[in-house]
Amino acid sequence: MMPAKASAKFVRISPFKMRQVANLVRGMNVNQAMSMLKLMNKGAALPIYRVIKSALANATDLANEQNPVDVDRLFVATIRADEGPTMKRIRARAQGRAYRVRKRTSHLFVELGQK
């Protein structure tokens, strides 16, 4: 089976927070990872869940008679949360000062393999 891939770009969550969740599901069975992400109380869990679901759909779409896909044998082979562009904003502070607020984004890449 060819590895099934999916990605999400410009996700409005910092890469640090995204990697905390990504490290938990790396190497996990797909069904187990998706059920864990559904119950997880982290903001990064929903985008990761959606990308894994998309990769699973890509895997079933790529399947044919020569390369059948057993969904129970799929696992998260690669998951990467890279840094996207940072939006810079200004926060007004006391006495005419201004603080810079960095709104970070992430690029998420998932690849599913078969055991």
Image: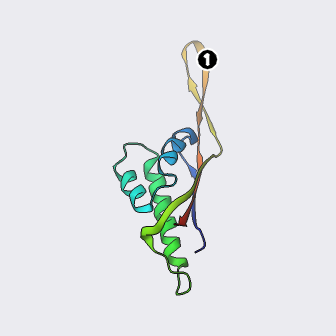
For image coordinates 48% across by 71% down, the residue present is: 57
Viewer-proximal residue among 14 and 23: 23
- For label 1, the SS is loop
Q: Residue furthest top?
A: 95
Estimate the x, y position of residue 79 in percent, counting from the top left. Answer: 57, 54
Q: Is residue 27 visible?
A: yes
Q: Is residue 13 visible?
A: no
Residue at 55% from the left image edge and 78% from the top image edge: 62
- Give coordinates of residue 93: x percent, y percent: 55, 19
Q: Position of residue 10 (x, y in %)?
A: 59, 51
- Residue at x 49% of width, y 76% of height: 69
Q: Residue at x 52, y 72 (%)?
A: 59
Image-quadrant location for residue 29:
bottom left
Q: Residue furthest front?
A: 115
Question: Is 71 on the left-hand or right-hand side of 10?
Answer: left
Q: Which residue is mark 1?
A: 97
Image coloring type: rainbow
Disc 1 residue type (three-letter): Arg
Tell me if residue 36 comes above or below residue 86 in the rendering. Answer: below
On screen, residue 103 above or below 61:
above
Q: How many marks?
A: 1
